[in-house]
Amino acid sequence: FVLTFSVYFGTYAVANLTELALDLQKKKMPDEQRHNFQVAATSTANISLLAWRDSLWARDASTIRPSTTTVWRSMSLFAMRDSATLYATFYLAPIAATHLVQEHDVDRNLAELLTAVVLPMTTQLATAPLHIYANDGWQRPTATLAERWRTIQKGFGAVSLARSLRILPVLGIGSFSNHQFRSLLLGGQQSHDNRFVKRQRTLQFLEHRPTRIEALRKASGGHRPARAVV
């Protein structure tokens, strides 16, 4: 639990901090470039953290010490697996949500929730073989392709279901909830221009806060302003 919590805490921390940094840029970035930059930063953090976590799990489950080649091969497969999941989460889901809204008049929040849940979970059907192969390669580095294929066939159903259920709260519901929470903090669904201006005003307020406090003290005769009683 601690490893998984660390992975997704780090992922969403990077996502939100990246968006904050983009909001605070003096020069507004085009929407598509902004989105690509945020996805790149989030994906790098998530893939790196997941590869680290899964390598620890594979190492603990293995009874032998794998070679460096085996380790890098398995971690590369883990990275491919997670890249596909993140692509579905951050690229395909928003596109599908927009299509549902524009072409089928589906409520925006409902469309975003449905696509954020369904697409990452469905992607696990395609990535489960990569996951099984990577783990099996770590534990049985000398197995033949035929043996690996039988292992994939045997574990496909359980692994794809387990990974879908694991993805549901952290990338499905988690992604949607994080987006809604961030929008709420920023005053609802705003354009990037409004969000940019709001962030700049916040910075200006923080920068001049000591000066304003000193001015209030002088205006009150050198005493601190009385605190309002509620």
Image (tube, rainbow, N blue to C red):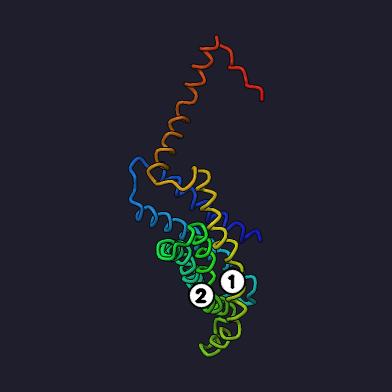
Amino acid type, label 2: Thr
For label 1, the SS is helix
Amino acid type, label 1: Arg
* Label 1 sits on residue: 163
Q: In the rendered view, would you say 180 is above or below 4?
A: above
For label 2, the SS is helix
* Residue closest to the far bottom: 146
- Circles 2 and 1: CB atoms closer than 8 Å: yes
**3 or 228: nearer the viewer:** 228
* Label 2 sits on residue: 127
**Residue 148 visible, this angle:** yes
x and y, in percent, of residue 129 in the image? 52, 79
Q: Earlier in the sequence, mark 2 or mark 1?
A: 2
The CA distance from mark 2 to mark 1 is: 9 Å
x and y, in percent, of residue 161 in the image? 60, 75
x and y, in percent, of residue 139 in the image? 59, 78
Query: Which residue is at 57% across, 66% downward?
Result: 167
Query: Which residue is at 56% across, 78% downward?
Result: 132
Q: Quadrant of the C terminus?
A: top right
